[in-house]
Image (cartoon, grey):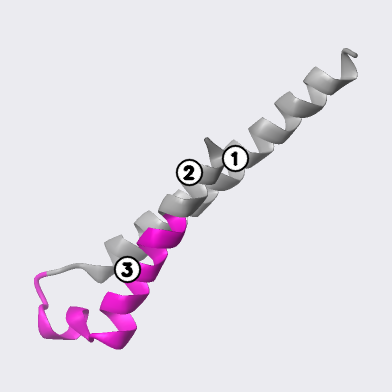
Amino acid sequence: MAILMFSGFCASASVTIFFMKDMNFCAEYRRLDCSQFTLSVTLAFFTWLLQAASSFSGFWLLISFF
């Protein structure tokens, strides 16, 4: 699950960078709030980080029983 979340985070980060830096999409369309794109990518990264930590600790707990 954490791998899928990481791939989703990477995809959304690349789209955000493409819109903001490469295409100047945010400069042309002022109605879009590009800070929300950045915030969503940041929250996706933190979600992945917490999911990865949870997966690691669950795996560690499983191994400690054997």
**Residue drawn 53% across the image and 49% down it:** 46
The verdict on residue 22 being magenta is: yes
Q: Please count the marks in the image.
A: 3
Callout 1–callout 2 Cβ contact below 8 Å:
no
46 to the left or right of 27: right
- Amino acid type, residue under disc 2 in the picture: Leu
Residues in magenta, as a range: 9-31
Q: CA distance from mark 1 to mark 2?
A: 13 Å
Which residue is the site of mark 2? 4
Position of residue 41 measured from the top left corner of the image (x, y, whole percent): 40, 58
Residue 21 against residue 54 in the figure, above or below: below
Q: CA distance from mark 1 to mark 3?
A: 23 Å
Residue 56 against residue 30 in the figure, above or below: above
Which residue is the site of mark 3? 15
Which residue is the site of mark 1? 50
Name the N-terminal-most of marks 1 and 2.
2
Of residues 26 and 11, the one nearer the viewer is 11
**Residue drawn 11% across the image and 77% down it:** 30
Q: Main secondary structure of the magenta part?
A: helix
Residue 13 against residue 25 in the figure, above or below: above
Viewer-nearest of labels 2 and 3?
2
**Residue drawn 47% across the image and 44% down it:** 5
The verdict on residue 20 being magenta is: yes
User: Which numbered circle lies on residue 17?
Assistant: none
Position of residue 39 measured from the top left corner of the image (x, y, whole percent): 37, 59
- Amino acid type, residue under disc 1 in the picture: Leu
43 to the left or right of 64: left
Helix or strand or loop: what does disc 1 sit on? helix
